[in-house]
Amino acid sequence: MFVKLWMTSNVLTVNSSQPIAEVEQIMRENRIRRVPVVDDGHLVGIISREDIFRALPSIFDPSISPENLDQAGRIEAGSIMTRSPVTVEPSTPLEQAALLMRTHKFGALLVMQDTELVGIITETNIFDAFLEVLGAKKQGARIEIKIDHKPASFYSMLQVFKKCEMTVLGITVFPDFSEEHQLITLKVQGENIEKLIDSLWDSGLQINRLHTDEHESTK
């Protein structure tokens, strides 16, 4: 999967000369936590709610006068924004974007096509993609299977699902489950779940866990 499939397009932006009180209002009204800063069509930075909260004095501090609060709110976005933010392209693999976010502790990455800002990919987008890959939003049976590390074993397992006419909604592979086995997790739909389970065991495949919408069991 690529970033372009999960990013948010039509991104709201602000310019570097806007007061941070105005930027905070834009974020609050649109329920977003960060906004790119664009001047004359060029990306110059990104500003987050945390940046603004650090710049603004607390309204609960009795030593801060209304005049001081008003003055702080007039600080320009450009003075507290993060300059030259890390970006990705629409064709960047989603896992590469997720690794960048995890490594640098970013909550989002801006998406650039050449010099044009075309989107933003956030932690929420990454999480939604993860749920989609696992088929979490769809009804079906979730099966964990232990197989050895031989490539032929993986393809033999898929043949069992094909023979039982099961639809695979999602599949993940945990290759380092153990020294002897990798763990394959599949979300499937079909009328022949009992036949599938019997066929998997008959093929010598080890079912680690089975969970259906009606019940959960371990064989």
Image (spheres, rainbow, N blue to C red):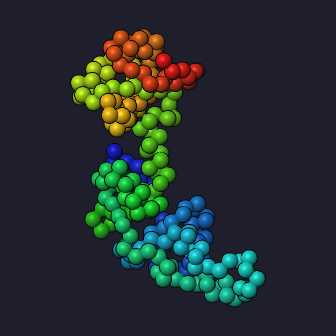
In-front residue for pair 40/90: 90
Residue at 29% across, 53% down: 91
- Looking at the image, residue 207 sits to the left or right of residue 152; the answer is right
Q: Quadrant of the N terminus?
A: top left
Image location (x, y in percent) of residue 199: 37, 12
| Whether residue 159 is situated above or below residue 71 in the rendered picture | above
Image location (x, y in percent) of residue 218: 51, 21
Q: Is residue 22 visible?
A: no
- Looking at the image, residue 142 sits to the left or right of residue 84; the answer is right
Q: Residue furthest right?
A: 62
- Looking at the image, residue 161 sits to the left or right of residue 189; the answer is left
Q: Is residue 135 visible?
A: yes
Image location (x, y in percent) of residue 4: 35, 52
| Whether residue 199 is situated above or below residue 174 in the rendered picture | above
Image location (x, y in percent) of residue 154: 29, 26
| Whether residue 103 is situated above or below residue 51 in the rendered picture | above
Residue at 23% across, 24% down: 152
In the rendered image, which quarter is residue 130 located in? top left
Residue at 46% across, 80% down: 78
| Whether residue 13 is situated above or below residue 144 in the rendered picture | below
In the rendered image, which quarter is residue 207 located in? top left
